[in-house]
Image (cartoon, rainbow, N blue to C red):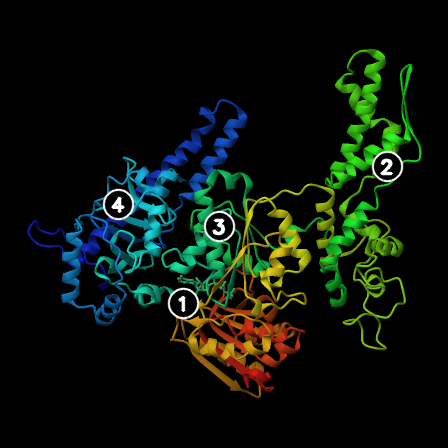
């Protein structure tokens, strides 16, 4: 095993009789990087040239538009960021597929003796030469065609999936962010998602998957500066002891989230490469890479099912704007520019939210029972006709009696179509009956125009409005909240009278638990009902109800795949928002029950998965922490027994962090001083405090000449961010200053869970400042 880290020398050519030195190797790899970058630039130039002339080759406007869109996407996908390595690994397959042996013991002893000495590196080079590789800048796998690599212009071939390792015997592949080919179409860099690249993430000494050597490259600002070889054929394996992995995990965090494509761990890779048809739920402790896994899975699925998912689309759902800004750059860096990102609020934006519900009211509106209340409310609009239909048509009069009308309404109802489709189906059936009469009398089929005219005729519309009136989603919810009798009918046996009162605000029934304290004014729905839906000031929970209503009335569109992050905070009704959008697709659900802070927070993933319409999804734990240093994590984990959730705690890979907990008298002054000290280190600094303390802290830092950013600023601005505790979920900073934990806990019912989130944001150092006693579990 070897690790070589040094500044690159000027490239030297090995003499014919001299075995290549490590410097030669580095120079050769650097040259391969330059060649690959040049090839990528050529690919991009070609795509740009095609884009410029595309409309001339397309036969018609539609084709020109499609082609233009395709080529614009292709140009964006081929963007090259010189700061990120184009490749990060190399696979040298053995010349024959070695038998799988249990080499775990030798691997361990090799690990123990692996040093960065000349002796070891000499051995490595000999071994490399044995596998048929040379220090030449040209990889030996130039015969690696699309068939062997399993990709053809970004599309996956089944043939490759079934191909064994033998197919790659004696070949060498560089693995990187995207596929790069030379002028002849031969691969210079393989996409990390290609089937053959899987060995880079999964091969081990126990199961080398045909690999003789796995090489990882170290980079500094886009410059290749080192490499690390594992001779899997000799039982060598670094695992999480890899210095390149350690350097990546410990690097200072600046700006938005980065991809982890170079260092995806085997258990993460299993999740990333799960089948498109498979919905999975990842229960992962803080910093175990859930978000990273979800985003890489989206990129992987897009690669594997490019055309299908381009049509049906991939959606990433995150908890808030700050989080979406933080993750926004990851997928474009992987060449994926078409994934939609949204909060649940964005998905339910049919109405503008201008009111706030008291928590007790919001809890009812977010409860799964509301789905049934709304379903019944829609159903109640379907009525019975009391009059036959009589339509004048020139000299004819067509008549449909009550009995057939009643039958066709019942038949349509039994079909359980979305309500608006049902209305159109009833209309079509009525027209069908009229058509039959007309045909019998005139002995000819009426025209399309006649059919349309009949369907829109006053008697037919009057009938429809009586038995199946047109409904809008906001109109339905408005009618329900404005009319206690209508709500009572729909909620009978589902909501208590007191709960109904909370929704409509129109009764004197005593409040349920969670309502106002005795003597205080009872909480009322925050909705400010106007005379019409348009004139109503809706709450966020109303928007979710209106989306549910829309799902009952129309047929909603479904994505091919939806990644949902921080899923532990979804209410039953929010789950249903997502379920409607993933009905015909699959889900990647990411979350941590210990970080659940919403009043309706999940305590059991099975329940959440049922609401999401994927009851059989596999729940997979992740427990290796890549963010939070061990000491900091041990401090945060003291809260776990008080959080009433059954989750495995994280184990940190990081031993390097610093935790300080200080009692102070002047909190604001101590915060300013702490931030000043933190700025002496590299990386980002966050001050996290109870929401109502944020303005005061921002002002104090400004007075001390320290400029601050908000969490929604996606990097590039000031290094210090002041973050309200309620916004920090999913984010991370090098140095975190936690101000007055007791206030964070006191600010909300699930304050201890919130504090757990806050205490797990630090990458390198965390300072906890308090003047009040620490919350009991921490003391
Ligand atoms: N395999 C890996 N290699 C390098 N870094 C990794 C790896 N996996 C995760 N990380 C890093 O660890 C940090 C935490 O990852 P991520 O935010 O995905 O964790 P999470 O489980 O979603 O955390 P949270 O529970 O706080 O939302 C990120 O900086 C991520 O880049």
- Is ligand 1 within 8 Å of the beta carbon of the residue shown at mark 3? no
Measured from the top left, where is residue 217 in percent x and y? 29, 58
Instruction: Find the residue positioned furthest to the right.
Output: 387
Residue corresponding to mark 4: 166
Q: Around disc 4, counting alpha carbons within 10 Å, would you say few (fewer than 14), some (14 to 19), or many (20 or more)?
A: some
- Is ligand 1 within 8 Å of the beta carbon of the residue shown at mark 4? no
Residue corresponding to mark 2: 465
Question: Which label's residue is closer to the chain start, 1 or 3?
Answer: 1
Question: Which label's residue is closer to the chain start, 3 or 4?
Answer: 4
Instruction: State how far apart marks 1 and 3 are (Cα).
Output: 26 Å
**What element does badge 1 sit on?**
loop
Question: Which label's residue is closer to the chain start, 2 or 1?
Answer: 1
Residue corresponding to mark 3: 298
Q: On the rendering, which quadrant does ligand 1 occupy? A: bottom left
Q: Residue at x 14, y 66 (%)?
A: 119
Question: Which label's residue is closer to the chain start, 4 or 2?
Answer: 4
**What element does badge 2 sit on?**
helix
Q: Around disc 1, counting alpha carbons within 10 Å, would you say few (fewer than 14), some (14 to 19), or many (20 or more)?
A: some
Question: Which label's residue is closer to the chain start, 2 or 3?
Answer: 3
């Amino acid at each position: 095993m070897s690790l070589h880290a040094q500044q690159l020398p000027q490239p030297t050519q090995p003499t014919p009789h001299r075995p290549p030195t490590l410097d030669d190797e580095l120079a050769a790899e650097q040259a391969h990087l330059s060649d690959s970058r040049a090839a990528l630039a050529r690919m991009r130039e070609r795509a740009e040239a095609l884009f410029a002339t595309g409309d001339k080759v397309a036969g018609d406007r539609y084709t020109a538009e499609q082609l233009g869109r395709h080529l614009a996407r292709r140009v964006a996908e081929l963007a090259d960021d010189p700061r990120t390595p184009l490749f990060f690994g190399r696979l040298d397959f053995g010349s024959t597929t070695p038998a799988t042996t249990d080499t775990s013991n030798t691997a361990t002893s090799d690990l123990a003796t692996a040093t960065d000495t000349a002796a070891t590196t000499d051995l490595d080079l000999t071994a490399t030469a044995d596998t048929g590789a040379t220090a030449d800048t040209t990889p030996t796998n130039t015969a690696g065609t699309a068939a062997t690599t399993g990709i053809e212009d970004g599309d996956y071939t089944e043939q490759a999936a079934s191909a064994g390792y033998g197919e790659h015997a004696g070949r060498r592949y560089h693995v990187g962010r995207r596929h790069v080919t030379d002028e002849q179409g031969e691969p210079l860099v393989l996409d990390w998602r290609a089937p053959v690249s899987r060995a880079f993430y999964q091969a081990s000494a126990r199961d080398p998957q045909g690999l003789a050597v796995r090489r990882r490259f170290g980079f500094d600002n886009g410059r290749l500066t080192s490499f690390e070889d594992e001779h899997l054929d000799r039982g060598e394996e670094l695992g999480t002891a890899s210095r390149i992995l350690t350097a990546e995990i410990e690097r200072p965090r600046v700006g938005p989230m980065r991809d982890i494509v170079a260092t995806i761990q085997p258990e993460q890779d299993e999740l990333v490469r799960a089948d498109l048809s498979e919905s999975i739920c990842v229960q992962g402790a803080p910093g175990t890479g859930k978000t990273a896994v979800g985003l890489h899975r989206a990129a992987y699925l897009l690669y594997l099912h490019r055309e299908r998912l381009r049509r049906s689309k991939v959606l990433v759902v995150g908890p808030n704007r700050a989080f979406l800004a933080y993750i926004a750059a990851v997928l474009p860096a992987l060449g994926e520019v078409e994934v939609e990102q949204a909060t649940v609020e964005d998905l339910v934006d049919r109405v503008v939210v201008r009111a706030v519900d008291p928590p007790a009211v919001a809890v009812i509106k977010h409860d799964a029972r509301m789905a049934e209340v709304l379903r019944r409310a829609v159903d109640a609009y379907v009525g019975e006709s009391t009059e036959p239909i009589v339509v004048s048509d020139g000299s004819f009069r067509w008549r449909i009696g009550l009995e057939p009308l009643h039958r066709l309404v019942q038949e349509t109802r039994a079909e359980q179509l979305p309500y608006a489709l049902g209305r159109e189906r009833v209309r079509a059936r009525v027209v069908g009956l009229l058509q039959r009469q007309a045909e019998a009398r005139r002995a000819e089929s009426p025209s399309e125009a006649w059919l349309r005219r009949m369907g829109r005729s006053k008697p037919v519309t009057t009938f429809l409005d009586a038995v199946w009136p047109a409904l809008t989603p906001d109109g339905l919810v408005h009618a329900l909240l404005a009319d206690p009798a209508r709500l009572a009918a729909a909620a009978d046996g589902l909501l208590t009278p007191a709960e109904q009162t909370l929704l409509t605000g129109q009764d004197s029934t005593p409040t349920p638990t969670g309502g106002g304290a005795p003597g205080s004014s009872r909480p009322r729905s925050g909705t400010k009902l106007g005379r019409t839906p348009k004139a109503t000031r809706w709450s966020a929970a109303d928007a979710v109800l209106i989306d549910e209503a829309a799902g009952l009335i129309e047929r909603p569109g479904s994505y091919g795949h939806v990644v949902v992050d921080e899923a532990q905070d979804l209410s039953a009704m929010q789950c249903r928002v997502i379920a409607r959008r993933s009905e015909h697709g699959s889900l990647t659900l990411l979350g941590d029950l210990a970080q659940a802070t919403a009043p309706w927070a999940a305590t059991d993933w099975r329940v959440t998965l049922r609401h999401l319409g994927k009851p059989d999804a596999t729940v997979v734990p992740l427990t290796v922490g890549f963010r939070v240093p061990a000491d900091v994590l041990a401090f945060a984990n003291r809260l776990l027994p008080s959080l009433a959730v059954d989750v495995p705690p994280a184990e940190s890979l990081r031993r390097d962090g610093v935790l300080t907990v200080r009692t102070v008298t002047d909190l604001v002054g101590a915060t300013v001083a702490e931030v000043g000290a933190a700025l002496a280190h590299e990386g980002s600094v966050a001050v996290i405090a109870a929401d109502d303390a944020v303005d005061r802290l921002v002002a104090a830092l400004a007075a001390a000449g320290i400029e601050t950013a908000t969490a929604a600023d996606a990097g590039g601005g000031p290094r210090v961010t002041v973050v309200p505790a309620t916004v920090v979920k999913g984010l991370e900073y090098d140095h975190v200053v936690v101000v007055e934990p007791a206030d964070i806990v006191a600010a909300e019912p699930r304050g201890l869970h919130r504090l757990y989130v806050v205490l797990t944001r630090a990458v390198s150092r965390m300072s906890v400042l308090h003047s009040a006693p620490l919350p009991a579990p921490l003391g």
